[in-house]
Amino acid sequence: QAGLTQPPSVSKGLRQTATLTCTGNSNNVGNQGAAWLQQHQGHPPKLLSYRNNNRPSGISERFSASRSGNTASLTITGLQPEDEADYYCSAWDSSLSAWVFGGGTKLTVL
Amino acid sequence: EVQLVQSGAEVKKPGESLKISCKGSGYSFTSYWIGWVRQMPGKGLEWMGIIYPGDSDTRYSPSFQGQVTISADKSISTAYLQWSSLKASDTAMYYCARLEQLAGRNWGQGTLVTVSS
């Protein structure tokens, strides 16, 4: 099953900006867009954005998503200690009729 | 408030069967796909399959086809994930999620399944 590609780790300083990437293909990210999930250790995933840049209610404006071609990005501004978590992208693959995930990026806030 | 409440942790022996559940509330259970996701210890999220409780249309990831069965009982707003013969490699946390706009909008708290002799 084809998955989405994310860098394993990103480290940034407090109050800095982090941009996480997620690369797929024209059947998933490039077609249907991507969603972003945040997962803290020991907790279930939490949806941050869907269909590229729609935020569920209650999600901080510090989280913004975008897409360029087959690559989706999640930008987190003003990094806070509580932003340290694993971040996953996901998308529906219309060719596979499958829900695909990225391998996850561990964000460390220094 | 949308909630997905999963059944409790399970400890099983290899070869045993198991059925875990995910009960939805606060929304129309028959109108949204429910997905099941595996997370092995220290690893990422893996899609197992999805079901549309309205008509029980079910899709499986090729990696899990034939290994598990996904079902739903719309009369009690509950989706299920079951194994007929567990293996040690099935040890993982399992999450259900309500899909909306092609994304896991709401997630259950997870069910930890431990398979050990």
Image (cartoon, rainbow, N blue to C red):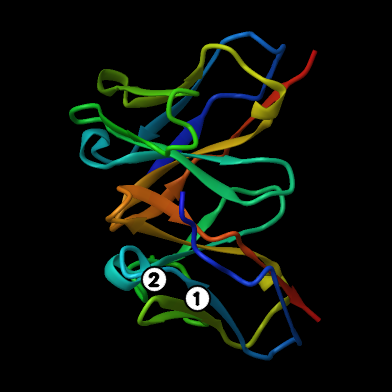
Please indicate, yes or no, whether residue B1 appears anywhere in the rendered image. no
Q: Nearer the viewer, residue A62 or A9?
A: A9
Q: On the image, numbered disc 1 is attached to which residue?
A: A60
Q: Which mark is residue A55?
A: 2
User: What is the three-letter code of the residue carrying label 1?
Assistant: Ser
| Residue A40 to residue B93: above or below | below
* Of the two numbered discs 1 and 2 in the rendering, the one whose residue sits closer to the viewer: 2
**What is the x, y in percent for residue A2?**
46, 55
Q: Residues within 10 Å of mark 2 (few under 14, many from 20)?
A: some
**SS at circle 1:** loop
Q: Residue at x 68, y 68 (%)?
A: A8
Q: Please state which amino acid type lies under the numbered disc 2.
A: Arg
Q: Identify the image quadrant of the C terminus of chain B.
A: top right
- Quadrant housing residue A14: bottom right
Q: Which residue occupies 55% across, 53% down?
A: A45
- Name the residue rendered at 66%, 72% in the picture: A83
Tell me the subunit letter for badge 1. A
Which percent across, then down, holds residue A38? 57, 62
Spot occupied by residue B69 in the image (x, y as percentages of width and height): 42, 22
Q: Say few, some or many: other residues with alpha carbon within 10 Å of mark 1 (under 14 / 14 to 19 / 20 or more).
A: few
Relative to B88, residue A47 above or below = below
